Amino acid sequence: MTVLVLVAAVLALLLGGAGAASAHAGLSGSDPADGSVLKTEPQHVTLTFTESVSFSDDSLRVLSPANERVNPRPAQHADGKENTARVELSGKLPQGTYTVAWRVVSADGHPISGAFVFSIGRPSETAAVVATDSPDDTAVGRLYGVLRHVAYSGLALLVGAATFVLVCWPTAGAPRPVRRLLTVGWVALTASTVALLLLRGPYESAGSVTSAFDLGQLGRAVTTRSGGALMARLVLLAVIAVLLRRWARRFDGADDGARPPEPGSRDRQVGALLAVALAVTWAFAEHAAAGIQVVLAMPVAVLHLLAMGVWLGGLITLLLLLRRRGPADQGVPASAIARFSRMAFRAVAVLVGTGVYQSWRQVGSWEALSSTSYGRTLVVKVAVVVLVLWVASYSRRWTARLVHEASPAKAVRVRAAERARVAQTVGAPPAPARQDHDTAPDAPAGDGPDEKAAPPASDADTYRRGLRRMVTVEAVLGVVVLVITTVLTGTQPSRAAGEKAAAASVADSGVKVLTVPFDMGTANHQGTVQITLSPGRVGENTVEAVVFTADGGLASVPELRVTLTQEELGIGPLDAKLKNQKGYWAAYDLRLPMPGEWTVNVTIRTTDIDQVTVRETVRITSVPR
């Protein structure tokens, strides 16, 4: 029943919590900029991200207004910078609006995607269609998230059960429940790793589940950081399978009644080395590998994973042994329970310490705890951890009582009390009634009315039952913590979200594009003037203006004047002093002294005697620090 409850809890939390993951990286800028209108066709398109990214041959596509691809070669890093992606464009490109669709993989293994447009000569209607769904809101993405939960669970069972055998109770490897637990942990971790490796290609490229068996795609996935980590994990699991089989044979050789062999210091060292290596395969390809203080974050993530496995996997192992039905001599020794209690306390202390550091590293501010998805999920995890610590305090109390009951001093006192129960009359034969009492095999000890009774023999069983109940609750809550942790590893950290928002803010403020309609002076002819203000911040700015006819063609006008006014502060009008550049108007030294809402007045002379003035507003931002 306990196993069924744990499995039901895992499935419920998986189905309820395996939502779409948010990636770590974000697009911080592009050249050409989103929405810009260029006079001549560019030679290449360059994207810049907030952290290093990797990509496949089809990661960056530039589509013409006719929905034709115009970048003949795959993307490359620009100037050797790992946080960039650049594609070269075809030689001669027609005028119109082009769509740039991209999908790359951030350093923590999560794919991100997006799209933007730019125009050459003049904007146009484009037939390019780009998917706007979340990279994880697909069948492959959801399956990949569930498999990550299974992998974490397998790691916890494998590390926890092995640690319990190697450290707490060396002969615990003989009972079949512990062997089954080790087998289940190994199988779950191995199967999920194989599935994750097969799905890695479709997960990165937004492919279908059936494309998981595409050998070409699998070969490309193996060469990535995440794919390499999964391959290393499979190699380690193969080594672990050999060792587990060897240890099982050693225990099988002792089934004839001999004492099972105890693992030596070399076995413990090999087990610790393999556990650390397994944890590194996670830290190398997830949040610890990206962001700030990577050198410190990697070992901290490894310690966090190992502590989780020792505590949660050990709890489940102890729970199965406590619920095991069998002769009294097969019960878990109180000394083993005491050793696990001390080990679990240290593991939880490591979990809390490393968790505090990871929280600071990933959240970045107190406000992010309530304003970001990562922060809110972290608050839930902290609340569950506090509840776990409260339950664990009761488990330690039951453990202390059980250890005290089984202590040598307690046994000496009990034996002394039993010897003191038989009264002898010096120099006289024993009474017949007393003799009958001594020869009765079923008479309970301590039934005399004037004798001091020893503690009942059922006290130890009472303590074990109480410990079993607390360990069950603690294990269930531990599964909840594990599921929340897995959700956190697939959620964009708050600090990264802040950096992405800041980068987006800077990118948005890099170019201010205003499109203002105006009357061209003839019947049913409505022209437009496009004003581009770059970088759109306090200080020196470039102003470019292009006039379009009603049908979208370029219009030539005798004069174009742009002035800006800050009405609230009484600044202006500041004349941009545009000059005719034979097709467009431009000025490169307009200085704006203050941030805020500015009014842009545009005066267009359509003929030698006719002119029209239109206005629009633009928000000027301060210089980022």
Image: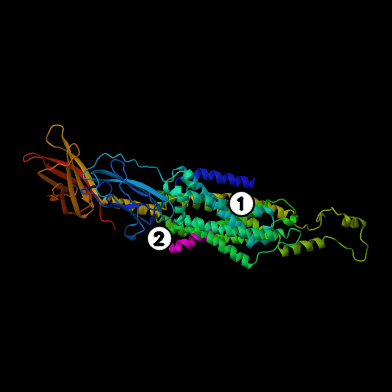
Q: Find residue 520 and report its horizontal and vertical position in percent.
A: 13, 37
Assess disc 2: are there few (<14), some (14-19) or many (≥20) residues with their C-alpha within 10 Å of its C-alpha. Answer: few
Q: Residue at x 51, y 56 (%)?
A: 231
Q: Residue tagged by mark 1?
A: 184
Q: Is residue 260 magenta?
A: no
Query: How many numbered circles are shown?
Result: 2
Image quadrant for the C terminus? bottom left
Does residue 128 appear left or right of residue 171 in this picture?
Answer: left
Q: What segment is highlighted magenta in the picture?
A: 291-307
Magenta-drawn stretch, dominant element (helix, strand or loop): helix
Given the current orientation, which residue lies at the most extreme top position?
523
The amino acid at mark 2 is Ile
Does residue 561 appear left or right of residue 9 in this picture?
Answer: left
Q: Residue tagged by mark 2?
A: 292
Q: Find residue 175 and report its horizontal and vertical position in percent.
A: 69, 55
**369 or 501: nearer the viewer:** 501
The amino acid at mark 1 is Val
Q: Residue at x 28, y 56 (%)?
A: 624
